Image: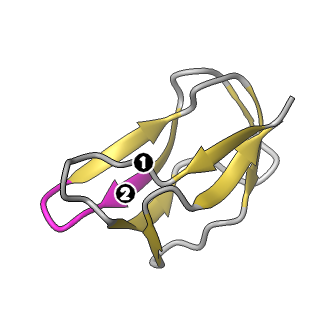
Amino acid sequence: MTTPINIPKLGVSMTEGTLVEWMVTNGQAVQAGDVLYRIETDKVENDIEAPVAGVIHISGVEGETYDVGIQIGSIE
């Protein structure tokens, strides 16, 4: 089963976020709760954790800004 990794809505007024840094590499095995990436909004930086265990597949590019809900990777 594939779990999408999307840009989360971290606040009521949040519409986009910048993918600052991936903390994992493409194809790396991750556990639920491992930090996957850091996102920056106009107010704060947050570390986003893996919701499930599996192998990460990265599609989002560091430094790019994405709308809330856009898929930037997946875990299989």
Residue 27 sits above or below residue 58 on the image = above
Give the residue pinned by disc 2.
Answer: 39
What colour scheme was applied to this rendering of the protein? secondary structure
The x and y percentages for residue 26 are: 76, 54
Secondary structure beneath label 2: strand
The x and y percentages for residue 43 are: 12, 60
The x and y percentages for residue 15 are: 31, 65
Q: Identify residue type, mark 1.
A: Pro
The x and y percentages for residue 17 are: 36, 65
In the image, taking residue 31 as reference, residue 22 lies left or right, namely left
In the image, taking residue 25 as reference, residue 15 lies left or right, namely left
| Foreground: disc 2 or disc 1 | 1
Q: Real-space Cα distance between discs 2 and 1? A: 9 Å
Q: Are marks 2 and 1 in contact (CB under 8 Å)?
A: yes
Give the residue pinned by disc 1.
Answer: 8
Look at 57% across and 32% down and name the residue there.
Answer: 50
Residue 17 sits above or below residue 24 on the image = below
Q: Quadrant of the N terminus?
A: top right
Residue interval drawn in magenta: 38-44
**Does residue 41 belong to the magenta stretch?**
yes
Look at 18% across and 58% down and name the residue there.
Answer: 13
**Does residue 75 belong to the magenta stretch?**
no
In the image, taking residue 6 as reference, residue 17 lies left or right, namely left
